[in-house]
Image: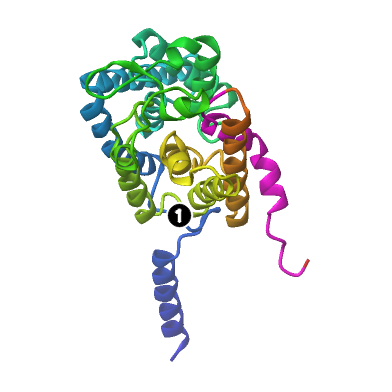
């Protein structure tokens, strides 16, 4: 090959390489999923629980969820507009926050309290720290804790499915040793018992959890270690493990709140530690604390410890 031919061949090869190789700054490997895709999967996974709440508590359940979502989206839009940040309500993250907040509220919650809770979740639980990805605590649980401290009567008033008669929750019946009939395992599994809107039906929550696991939006580490720890401790202290797993908000918290990508550990070992810690705190609050339920505060406390867990379980650099 003469000199001109070699130069022509080289020029063609450089053209082919330039078309196939893209030179850019990191990251060089990009996932096809974005925040909106992840949030869409979570919304879809929560749909069975939403349907169950409507079946057992009527259309008011849908009204509470709608109000919570509306004020969550409006609050996020307001604060991003106020601080002249990019408007990101289209990523559906405030919709998920609104749904989760409504799911941890009693079905008799007044709508004004729901609206305040949504504002607190977005403002104190999320935007005050810098927005999505910077919040150290689960926003919906922050709002629930604030509402419980501010209006404890509203937050602890439970009603029976279908007839709306005021009653105690299953955990409350055991905690206060009330002379009331406890729901059967089947009733708790299907959702025919008193409780928060989104926590009552174990079946509906498990259907959503299976979908999230299939989509690989969550892993098994936190839910299994969380629920397993509660069951094991109940066995050790001669408490009914199935009752304590299904009676409160454990299934909702383990699969949909403790697994939050922002507020949970990054490593697999860290997730296991996180789940065990949530389980121990939950049974500690239930058995010795003043509240019948302990899921909310156990997850918030472990959220606070997430940076330490990440630091302890951080993999060592190869060769160090």
Q: Nearer the viewer, residue 276 or 222?
A: 276
Picture residue at 41% right of the left edge, 15% below the top: 157
Seen as rendered, the residue at the extreme bottom is 1
Is 308 colored magenta in this rendering? yes
Compared to residue 178, the image places residue 232 above or below, namely below
Query: Which residue bears the numbered disc 1?
Result: 30
Picture residue at 52% right of the left edge, 48% below the top: 231
Give residue 184's position: percent from left, percent from top.
33, 38
State the quadrant of the N terminus.
bottom left
The number of callouts visible is: 1
Q: Residues within 10 Å of mark 1 (few under 14, many from 20)?
A: few
- The kind of secondary structure element at disc 1 is loop
Is 214 colored magenta in this rendering? no
Would you say residue 134 is visible in this rendering?
A: no
Compared to residue 310, the image places residue 108 above or below, namely above
Q: Nearer the viewer, residue 43 or 150?
A: 150
- Side of 55 where 43 appears, left or right: right
Range of the magenta residues? 291-319
Give residue 298's position: percent from left, percent from top.
58, 34
């Amino acid at each position: 090959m003469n000199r001109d031919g070699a130069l022509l061949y080289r020029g063609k090869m450089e053209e082919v390489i330039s078309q196939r190789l893209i030179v850019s700054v990191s990251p060089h490997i990009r996932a096809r999923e974005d925040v909106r895709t992840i949030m869409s999967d979570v919304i879809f996974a929560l749909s069975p629980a939403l349907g169950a709440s409507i079946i057992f508590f009527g259309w008011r359940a849908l009204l509470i969820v709608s109000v919570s979502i509306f004020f969550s989206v409006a609050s996020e839009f307001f604060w991003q507009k106020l601080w002249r940040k990019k408007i990101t309500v289209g990523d559906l993250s405030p919709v998920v926050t609104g749904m989760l907040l409504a799911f941890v509220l009693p079905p008799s919650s007044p709508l004004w309290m729901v609206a305040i809770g949504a504002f607190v979740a977005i403002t104190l639980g999320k935007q005050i720290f810098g927005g999505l990805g910077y919040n150290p605590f689960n926003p919906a649980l922050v709002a629930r804790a604030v509402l419980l401290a501010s209006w404890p009567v509203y937050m602890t008033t439970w009603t029976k499915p279908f007839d709306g008669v005021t009653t105690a929750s299953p955990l409350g019946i055991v905690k206060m040793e009330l002379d009331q009939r406890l729901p059967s395992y089947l009733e708790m599994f299907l959702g025919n018992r008193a409780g928060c809107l989104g926590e009552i039906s174990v079946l509906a929550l498990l259907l959503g959890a299976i979908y999230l696991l299939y989509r690989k939006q969550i892993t098994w580490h936190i839910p299994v270690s969380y629920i397993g720890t509660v069951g094991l401790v109940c066995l050790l202290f001669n408490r009914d493990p199935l009752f304590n797993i299904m009676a409160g908000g454990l299934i909702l918290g383990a699969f949909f709140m403790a697994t939050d990508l922002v507020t949970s550990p990054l490593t697999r070992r860290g997730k296991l530690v996180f789940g065990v810690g949530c389980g121990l705190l939950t049974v500690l609050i239930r058995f010795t604390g003043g509240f019948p339920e302990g899921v909310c505060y156990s997850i918030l406390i472990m959220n606070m410890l997430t940076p330490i867990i990440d630091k302890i379980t951080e993999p060592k650099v190869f060769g160090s």
